Each structure stands twice: as C-alpha cells, then as structure tokens.
Amino acid sequence: MSDDARTDDPRRAVPRTDALLADPALRAAEQRLGRALVKDAVARVQQRIRTGALAPERAVPAVLDDLPTTAGSLRPVLNATGVLVHTNLGRAPLSAAAVEAIAAAAGTTDVELDLATGRRGPRGEAALGALLDAVPAAEAALVVGNCAAALALVATALGQGRELVLARGELVEIGDGFRIPDLLQSTGARLREVGTTNRVTVEDYRAALSPDTGAVLKVHPSNFVVRGFTRSADVGELAAALAGTGVPLVADVGSGLLRAHPLLPDEPDLQSTLAAGADLVLASGDKLLGGPQAGLVLGRADLVQRLRRHPLYRALRVDKTTLAALEATLRGPTPPVRQLLETGVEELRTRATAVAGRLAAAGVDARVVDAPGRVGGGGAPEHPLPGVAVSLPDGFAEPLRRATVPVVGYVEEDRTLLNLRSLLPADDDALVGAVLEVARRWT
Ligand SMILES: *Cc1c(COP(=O)(O)O)cnc(C)c1O
C-alpha cells in the first residue's frame, strides 16, 4: 500500500475522542447535558467519518447537531387529536404559572419548614389550603400520587380485612388494563357487589351493610355510559341511607372538576358531590383540573386524618414540585385544559381558516372541516365538544409525528385531521411550521 493511499484512508483522519471533547462548544454541551450523552454523540459522528459519510472537519458541528435538546428524552408534542386530556400525551398541559412554580420549588425549598420559626412545618400546607378554598364543602384535604393511589389508600385504611360495598355496574376498567376492582382487592379489602350491571337501588346498598362494612364506594364510570333500562343510586340518596350508620360514603369522581361546569352537565364535581353528602371525594389532578398528576382526597376531617396517619400514606405522598404545580394551578390563571374546553367554536374556525390559508399559500391541500373534540382521560364520554380541524391529504399523519416539533393528529376517511380543539392559539405557528417541514421534504 502506498503512503498516499494510507493518508486517504478515512479511518486515519477520524478525530480523537479527547480532542473533540476538548472543543469549547462541546465542553459547553457537556456542562449542560453531561459527559455520557456528548460522548455517545461523538462516537456516532466518528463512525460516520470512519465510513466516509462525513468529512472529518465537519465533526464538531455534526456532534452539536446530533446532541439531544435536553438530558431527558421526553419532547414537547403538539396535541392535534382533539382530545383535551390525552393520557398518552401526558394528560393536562401545565399552565405557565405552574411551570414557574415548579422551577421555583425545584431546588431546596420550604416545603416542610416554617421559615419564621425555623421549625418543621406541615408539608404542602399551601397547596392543601388552595384546594380547600376551591372546594369549600371540604373540611380537609390530602394529596397523593394519583387517583389510583387515593383509591388504594382509602381501600387500605377503611376496607382492609373488611368489606367495601359498591355497585356491580361501577366495577370499571379505566384504561390500559387498569381495573378498579382489582386495585381495591389488592389492598386486602373484600368487595361486596350490589345490584346488577344495569340497575342498583338504595335498598340494595342498605341490604349489604353489615358490621363488617368498611365503606360504601361510588365510582364514576367515567369512560362509558349505560343506556336503556338503567337505575343507579345517587350520592344524595346514599348519604341519606347511610345517615346514622357510621359507614363512610366515598365517591371517586375521577375527572377533578372542582365545581359544576355548564359545558359538562353530566360530569360530577368535587364541591357538589361533597355538598350532596359524600364523606370523602377522590379525583385526579391532571384531568379537568388541569394540573400535575396527583390524587386528591377531600372531605371529612376525621377521615382525612385517618388516611394521613396510615403508614401507606408515606409511600403515596407527592413531591415538592407536584405540590408547587398544584397550588399554582388552583391559585393562578385559568389552566390550559379549561381554556381549551371553553374556546368558542367560531374562534377555532377562524384559527383553522388562518392555518389552512397559510398552508394553501405554500401549495398544501389544506381544508377546514368540522370535527368534534372530546374531554378524554376518562371524562364526559358521551359529550362531544364542537371542534374544527385542518384536513390534509392522506399520508401526513405519520411524518408529522416525526417532525422536529412532533404533531399528533388522526386519520379519518383518508384525510389527516389536525383538530384545533386541543391546541392553544400559541401553538398555531408551530403547527404550520411542522406541516410545511413535512411538505418541503416531499417536493
Ligand atoms: C381516571 C380515573 C381514575 C384513575 O386516575 P389516575 O389519576 O390516573 O390514577 C380513577 N377513577 C376514575 C373514576 C377515573 O376517571
């Protein structure tokens, strides 16, 4: 082999790892992302140089290009599904106020310290205070990891070794194989099912009570409805039937609506359910409340205290960032989920027309169509929200998910629909940008 051939060999020109890592731009990246992620990117770029796919002098910009945006791999995604609370997309988007509160609490913070006295203070008191202000019918509140955790805590503290009475029609599966009866039984509580799939009466509940009864549980069947020959006992009737028995009535309302909302007439809310006589209500923080993942427990002070004192509570409690985000969601401006819910359909049409117009001007076959949205996340299953979508030709859905800012839409009758019901106005520019990025790749 001649010397010339050897100097042409791309393998000899591969920049060394330590030389690349010493580059100021890559040292700055290492400060931000950590050494391992930068080294991984360096190794990938060296491989491209080795195969001759990349010129050695392009190594540093290629590494910078290859680096992830953050040390975490979760990315912001535009939710164009029309589903406000999409479990696969992280449910409620947090408000800017909640994000700021998280950032403020992320370091060392006074989550459990009274700065005035220097003594230990009650954990998360401010978030609990915000919950109690929002739901005045509650005497006390507790926050755990999610609503499933709240159910597990209630079933353990009130039902372990005893019976939980609940309607057969409420033995529901919430999603992804999560079955509420399985969770309840896993705590050692026995389920005493009453009624039939379609009908249950207060009398059925009354007949099931015994000295073994730990609680009566009502679970909102949030993701389906039973129609036809049906009957159920509402919270008010059950509370009246349980009066004087000492058996607590616990209602899992799921969606986390604080108060009755005119746009969702069939959705139970925390305030009304307590006012109707429930002793405890349970809900998620990241559905219609629009906050972080959390399980909210509100109601009678003695019962909340029993749950707080139970050893299991320590395993289910939330961290400082959740408490911060929850408080800011409750005290701050209207969170995104409520804004999305309350946006008028004419405003959506105006925005869709503007988006479609910008796309059409760039040669994309974009049209404006009516397309209903949904609450999602197990909420208001029978209640379509009026919505408007930008309709694109078939074939956009998949590349849009892989755009620089990924967009998740859906396909209907051979068209890709991007539903604006689940997007904030501030997202429209990014939506246009993603579609144009995909369209450009095709031309
Ligand atoms: C969504 C839901 C749950 C589960 O809530 P997570 O916060 O996801 O644990 C439980 N019960 C009802 C009625 C629900 O709608």
Image: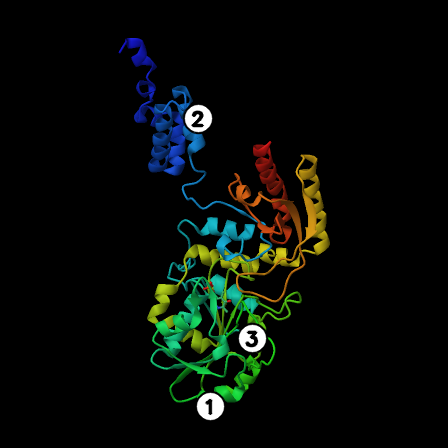
Residue indicated by mark 1: 207
Taking the view exactly as shown, the residue that stands out farthest to the left is 1
Above or below: residue 132 compared with residue 238 = above
Amino acid bearing label 1: Ala
Q: What x and y, as percent, mark residue 227?
A: 60, 75
Residue indicated by mark 2: 61
Label 1–label 3 contact, CB within 8 A: no
Answer few, some or many: residues within 10 Å of disc 3's Cα (few below 14, many 20 plus, some between 14 and 19): many
Q: Quadrant of residue 114?
A: bottom left
Of pointers 1 and 2, the one earlier in the residue sequence:
2
Specify whether 205 is left or right of 263.
Answer: left
Taking the view exactly as shown, the residue that stands out farthest to the front is 414
Of pointers 3 and 2, the one earlier in the residue sequence:
2
Q: Secondary structure under badge 3?
A: helix
Q: Which mark is residue 127?
A: none
Q: Nearer the viewer, residue 46 or 321?
A: 46
Q: How far apart, in angstroms, are the residues tagged by discs 3 and 2?
A: 59 Å
Amino acid bearing label 2: Pro
Above or below: residue 441 compared with residue 131 = above
